[in-house]
Amino acid sequence: MRAEETLDYFLKREKGILIIAILDLISDLDRRAFYLEYKGKVPFPRGLRRVSKKTLKRSSLQQLVMIWEHYDRIQDYLMALFMEVNPHLRPWYLDTCVLEWEIQEFGRKTKKTIGRIFGCIF
């Protein structure tokens, strides 16, 4: 059985994709909130509460899904505010977390292969 077919690999992959998606959502929310504050609408008077990478890595898959849904609701709220400020612009968000995970996984496998061939550890 190949490593790509095991349940552990699948769970690790899904967890990694969710972590990347959450971090991308947080950076997108920061960017949108900064723009709205510049235009005079303050969406978060006390600031946006962030989840640390350490907490994300220790969370279970169900907790990560709940965190992602929470930030997704906040993003919907910010996009509605964005449409009030700029009715002529359409807000959009491109989710690239699966591609980012595949690139990171390719890098890990390449480093592992090079280390095995040349006997060095990265």
Image: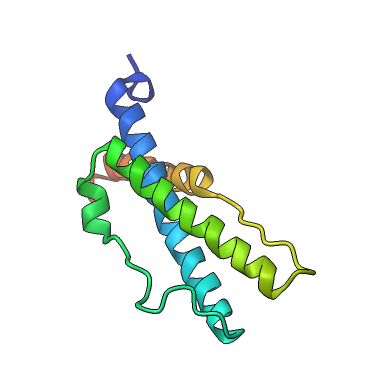
Q: Above or below — where is 1 with respect to 64?
A: above
Image location (x, y in percent) of residue 81 = 60, 68
Question: Which quadrant does the N terminus fall into?
Answer: top left
Q: In this orientation, which residue lies closer to the viewer: 97 or 32?
A: 32
Q: Quadrant of residue 39?
A: bottom right
- At x 68% / y 70%, what residue is drawn? 84
Q: In this orientation, which residue lies closer to the viewer: 90 or 27?
A: 90
Q: Is residue 120 visible?
A: no
- At x 54% / y 60%, what residue is drawn? 77
Q: Is residue 39 left or right of residue 59?
A: right
Q: Is residue 19 visible?
A: yes
Q: Above or below — where is 26 with respect to 116?
A: below
Q: Is residue 55 left or right of residue 33?
A: left
Image location (x, y in percent) of residue 2 = 35, 19
Q: Above or below — where is 40 with respect to 10?
A: below
Q: Above or below — where is 47 with respect to 66?
A: below
Q: Is residue 105 left or right of residue 50?
A: right
- At x 44% / y 45%, what residue is drawn? 101
Image location (x, y in percent) of residue 13 = 37, 35
Image location (x, y in percent) of residue 78 = 55, 64
- At x 31% / y 20%, what residue is drawn? 6
